[in-house]
Every structure is written in structure tokens, then in C-alpha cells.
Amino acid sequence: MVDKLMKFEGVSKSYRSKPALNNVSFGVDSGKIIGLLGTNGSGKSTLMKIAAGLIPASSGSVSVLGAPVGLGTKSAVSFMPDRPLTESWMKVRDAVGFYRDFYSDFDEEKAKKMLDFMNLKDTDRVSSLSKGMNERLQLTLALSRQAKLYLLDEPIGGVDPVARAKILDAIVEFYSEDSSLVISTHLVRDIERIFDEVIFIRNGEIVLQEEVEDIRLKHGKSVDDMFKEVFAE
Ligand SMILES: Nc1ncnc2c1ncn2[C@@H]1O[C@H](COP(=O)(O)OP(=O)(O)OP(=O)(O)O)[C@@H](O)[C@H]1O
């Protein structure tokens, strides 16, 4: 029986000699929205890229649905990178076509509903979208794949609070409960309402993994208060 949707065991990663992750172990269960929270440079993107099979770990093992990360796990994982994969010549419909052609699990109907929700038009040029609208597009593309695990790297980075709220509403609205979502951010206060569980990462190490309800009940704190306490300098 596969117990965890994703599992990191003793994972370390260095870029040349610079360490980015140090002996990271944790698991992700199915059916959850999880916040991967850490300050700049704490290793969030590195962790996601390893889970998505884009870069290798230096040591340790990572599995998705019980299989080591590799070609076989890529269809179970949809990754939204912090930099867009779309090209500037594209219109929104070209970006959708690109994903449809590239991913056999792409759900075009879902993409259309999401684009509508996001107020994006087929004919909008990607290069003329504002940062917030572009993030809406990237999120639509990533969530329209039928994956088991969605990894969203800073989906609300650099957008104003109104755009943030819209993006969070879209995540909640279009999330399917037989999958899990891992969302990296350092903007904790704006987003904590949607998390079931949070993982704190500091200097490449996991320093806390806890259910949000437990943080509130056991510690009597919001996730944001806890984050500020753990990351105080
Ligand atoms: N391609 C790379 N080459 C060299 N060092 C890198 C590379 N990518 C990341 N690093 C370093 O690894 C560490 C972790 O970076 P990472 O991007 O994973 O952090 P992060 O938590 O996602 O940060 P941010 O919130 O700023 O995006 C940082 O010290 C960073 O400078």
C-alpha cells in the first residue's frame, strides 16, 4: 500500500558547493492543501523542482505515489514554476493549445471555466498581461492538468491583495479533493486561510510540519504569528 502521496527521505541538494537543502525528510498525504513556507532563499523552489523531476537531488530519495521521481512520476505531478513557461508571442489560446498538445492529461473544459473565472480572454496577448493576470494564466494552465500532486511555486508573489484574493478563490474553487496541492510562499497572512497543513523551511531544513488546526488549537496562534516567531532574526 502506498502510504504517502509524496515522500522526501534524507534529501540534500547543493549547487556546486553551496548547500540549498540539508537532510530533508517529510511526507505529503492525499487530499490536502499544504503551505510550504519560508523566507527568501530557504530552499522552497529547489524542493519543488526536485519533486517535479526537473533537477536531481545530490543525495537522499524522493518518491511520488511510491515510485522514485523520474519519467514515470511526471504525469502525476503538475508544477507551476515561479517563472512562466509561456512565450511572449502567444495569445492566451495559444498557451492553452501548447499545454493541451504537450500534456495528454490536460482538461480543456476545466481550462475554459478557469479562464472565465479569472476574466482572461482567449485573444489576450500573454506579453500584454499584467503580472497578476499572467499569474492567473499560469495557475489556470497548471491546475487544468489532471494530476495527483500540484506544486505551485509562489502563485501570489508580486501581485496586489485584490489579485491575491482572486487567485486564492480560484485555487479553492478548482481544487479537486483526490489530489494535493503544495503552495510555496512567504506571504503567509494572505494565504493561510486555505491551508490544511503547513511546512516551515529555514536554511534548507524543515523546522516544522503541522496541521493548521493544531497550530490554532494547541498553540493558540495563527500560522502568520507562528511563522514570525520561527523566522524572527
Ligand atoms: N541554479 C542555482 N545555482 C546556484 N545556487 C542556487 C541556484 N538555485 C538556487 N540557488 C541557491 O539555493 C538556495 C535556495 O534557493 P531556492 O530558490 O530554492 O529558495 P527559495 O526559498 O525558493 O527562495 P525565493 O523565495 O527567494 O524564491 C539559495 O541560497 C539560492 O541562492
Image: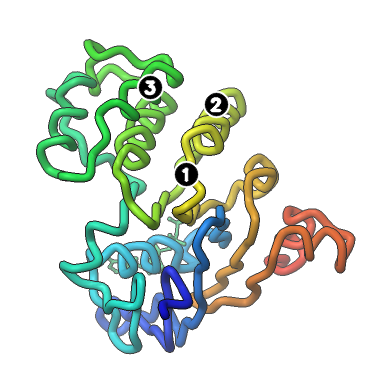
Mark 3 residue element: helix
Residue ID for mark 3: 113
Dots 3, 1 in contact, CB < 8 A: no
Query: Where is 185 relative to 214, above or below?
Result: above
Q: Is residue 156 left or right of residue 232?
A: left
Dot 2 amino acid type: Lys
The image quadrant that residue 161 belongs to is top right
Badge 3 or badge 1: first in the primary sequence: 3
Dot 1 amino acid type: Ser
The one nearer the camera, 85 or 93, is: 93
Q: Is residue 99 left or right of residue 231?
A: left
Mark 2 residue element: helix
Badge 3 or badge 2: first in the primary sequence: 3
Q: For residue 166, which numbered disc appears in the image? A: 2
In the picture, the quarter occupied by the C terminus is bottom right
Percent x, y of residue 181: 47, 53
Residue at 72 percent across and 59 percent down: it is: 212
Residue at 25 percent across and 29 percent down: it is: 108
Percent x, y of residue 130: 38, 21
Q: Residues within 10 Å of mark 3 (few under 14, many from 20)?
A: some
Dot 3 amino acid type: Lys
Residue ID for mark 1: 176
Q: CA distance from mark 2 to mark 1?
A: 18 Å
